[in-house]
Image: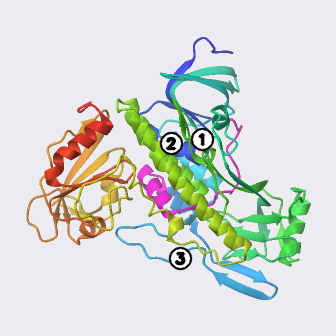
Amino acid sequence: MSNRHNPETTEVLIVGAGAAGLVLALDLARRGVQFRLVEKLEAPFAGSRGKGLQPRSMEIFEDLGVLGDLLASGNPYPPVHSYDGDQVKVSAISQARSPTPAEPHVIPLMLPQWRTEEILRAHLRAAGHAPEFGDELVGFAQDADGVTASLNTRTGEQQIRARFLIGCDGGRSFVRRALDINFPGESTSQRAIVADLRVDKLSRDAWHQWPKAEGGHLALCPLPGGDTFQMTAALAEGEEADLSDENIHALIRQRSGLADLVLHPPLWRSVFGVSARLAERYRVGCVFIAGDAAHIHPPTGGQGLNTSIQDAYNLGWKLAAVLHGAPDALLDTYEAERRPIAADMLRLSMGYLKAMQENRPMQRGRDAQQLDLAYRDSVLTQELRTAPGDLRAGDRAPDARLHDPQDGVVRLFDILKGPHFTLLAYQSEAPEIHHRFNGIDIAVKTVRAADAERVADLADVDNHLRDAYGLRAGQLVLVRPDAYVALIADARDSEALARYLTHWLGTQGN
């Protein structure tokens, strides 16, 4: 049945129910934003594909309330065993580090993408929402007030009127192509078969790799939560991709040299090409793109999925703020902040790819964990101290252990958690500001130093806050809803704080 003349309405239409679309939906749900999440696939994606969650993404998932389930399902990466004839070289995929009060998550988590998305869908259902599978966007038109989208659904053609449309629909994005956004970059001649299958008589305590195997690179990585491995087998240039059970089994036995392996039919299989592309724009009017629709990464380095998650996390609070009355210019900061990050991550991924091609060590360093990504040059950032320390406005907000008079030891992350801004007044009185701007709350906390006796909401007993943020007495820290430092100033600059909030969030008290 057609709904052409009386389209349904929503505030945000999200196209694509992969990781980026699901994270955006979860964030909008907790902000009370009306949305629909549509996906043209008839059923959820079933493969392992992007299997690594970096520490910064784990912080995001902690804020969204899903990290516990992810940790229960995933594992740290196993050691890499690289075989060259009878020689075995053992290495680690990431540098070993210990957690600190400022950085509680420092070890990447391995979890197949299908399981990550399954957990996100479960939490979305608990919030009263669900993706609409089998609903394909086939066209849209926009005007100054929003977007009218046409869908082919399981029950027929439907039209939806939305204030904003967000394309999270992958590397072949219909939304990006409909907007005529250029997608320049590099598509290499490299291709590989990837499959998930059970492999018996192969240890599950290592990521097995044969980089110099005759016919091309082979890798078998044990996936958490079951008895399957992710197989990656490089294809020669111009080689036809044979995805049959027989060929996949033959590739594994031939390249590994392990004839006694017991191989089961693949549960999922695909061919992927190695590309690095970045959209020239992330916004056209009321339409945005995010995730793989905006950037495609080589699989080396584990950056694509994580960059996509952070796109959604950056965009969600800004959409909600504008829908509640904040100025539209806030949405322009999405592209301004996220596109340079994607460009940096693409360069990093290509560097790892080159190292792999040259059989050089490609251990992922701190730069792969995305904890140091920052928005220091953003118009949303104000560093007002005359002598800032190592951490500056625009940086990721570190965690810290503090003392609450009622609850004892608390983490700063628990205070930041939720859809609000947080203002910390360090060894000073909290400035007189409105605590609500167009639907966004400002949580204000006073913090005393370890040796101070003044009454405060929190005590920095072990100086974790002071050391992580480089604070002196009488300074203010404003943290954005996506856990980046928006502003650091002296308490005497409280008028600058008020101007900042009014400029970017608009009307006070709503």
Quick one: label 2 or label 3, which is nearer the N terminus?
A: 2
User: Quadrant location of the C terminus?
Assistant: top left
Residue at 51% x, 53% y is: 340
Quote the CA–CA distance across marks 1 and 3.
32 Å
Query: Mark number for residue 168?
Result: 1
Q: Secondary structure at mark 2?
A: helix
Residues 38 and 287: in front is: 287
* Image: magenta residue range: 40-67
Q: Amino acid at mark 2?
A: Leu
CB atoms of marks 2 and 3 within 8 Å? no
Residue 496, image x, y percentages = 21, 46
Query: Mark number for residue 24?
Result: 2
Residue 83 vertical position relative to residue 11 in the rendered view, above or below? below
Residue at 71% x, 37% y is: 42
Residue 446 vertical position relative to residue 285 in the rendered view, above or below? below
Quote the CA–CA distance across marks 2 and 1.
9 Å
Quote the CA–CA distance across marks 2 and 3.
30 Å
Residue, far left: 453
Quick one: label 1 or label 3, which is nearer the N terminus?
A: 3
Q: Amino acid at mark 1?
A: Cys
CB atoms of marks 1 and 3 within 8 Å? no
Residue, far bottom: 86
Left or right: 261 in relation to 486 = right
Q: Secondary structure at mark 3?
A: loop
- Does any portion of residue 302 appear in the rendered image? no
Q: Amino acid at mark 3?
A: Gln
Residue 294, image x, y percentages = 60, 45
Residue 347 vertical position relative to residue 361 in the rendered view, above or below? above
Closer mark to the observer between disc 2 and disc 1: 1
